[in-house]
Image (tube, rainbow, N blue to C red):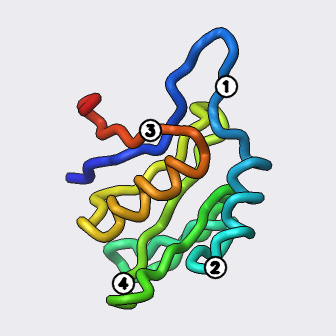
Amino acid sequence: MSYGVHIKRVRTQTSQGITLEEWIAYVRSDKEMRHIGEAVIKTSRGDTVRYDAPGMTEWIDPETGHKALFDHNKHGGKVSVANPSQETLVKMFRVAKALGAVVQGDEGE
């Protein structure tokens, strides 16, 4: 089972979610991140399925080499990571600070 953690803005009358354009601009400014724009999944039968994911971004931890996928959701105005490691959570907090946002888990914590 997957657990999601999200970078999002607290919505008020004067604030909005993170737009796709804003997300891609941030990614371009961050040397550790790479915009990939699609998701690739291997099925249990070994098939490869690709689908458009305009905000999909890969982060490679410069210390460990581990990869994490950050997925921008244009409808929710948030960026999500499934089952983030401790290192990925630290990166998420840095990204959130740069975007004027917060980090929040699926359960609201």
Residue 1 image point, x, y percent = 20, 52
**Which-is-in-front pick, marks 1 and 4?**
1
Q: Residue at x 50, y 24 (%)?
A: 10
Determine contact: label 2, label 4, CB under 8 Å: no
Query: Between residues 105 and 12, which one lies in front from this camera angle?
Result: 12
Q: Quickly name the residue at label 2.
A: 31
The image quadrant where one finds the C terminus is top left
In the image: residue 75, left or right of residue 60: right
Label whose residue precedes the other's in the sequence (1 or 4): 1
In this rendering, position of residue 51 left or right of residue 78: right
Locate residue 59, reporting x and y percent: 50, 74
63 vs 76, left or right, is left
Q: Secondary structure at mark 1?
A: loop
Q: Residue flagged by tag 4: what amino acid is it?
A: His
Does label 2 or label 4 sit earlier along the sequence? 2
Q: Rate crowding at label 1 as few (under 14), some (14 to 19) or many (20 or more) other CA atoms within 10 Å.
A: few
Q: CA distance from mark 1 to mark 4?
A: 31 Å
Picture residue at 51% right of the left edge, 60% below the top: 70
* Above or below, 16 relative to 42: above
State how far apart marks 3 and 1 are (Cα).
13 Å
Cα–Cα gap, marks 4 and 3: 23 Å
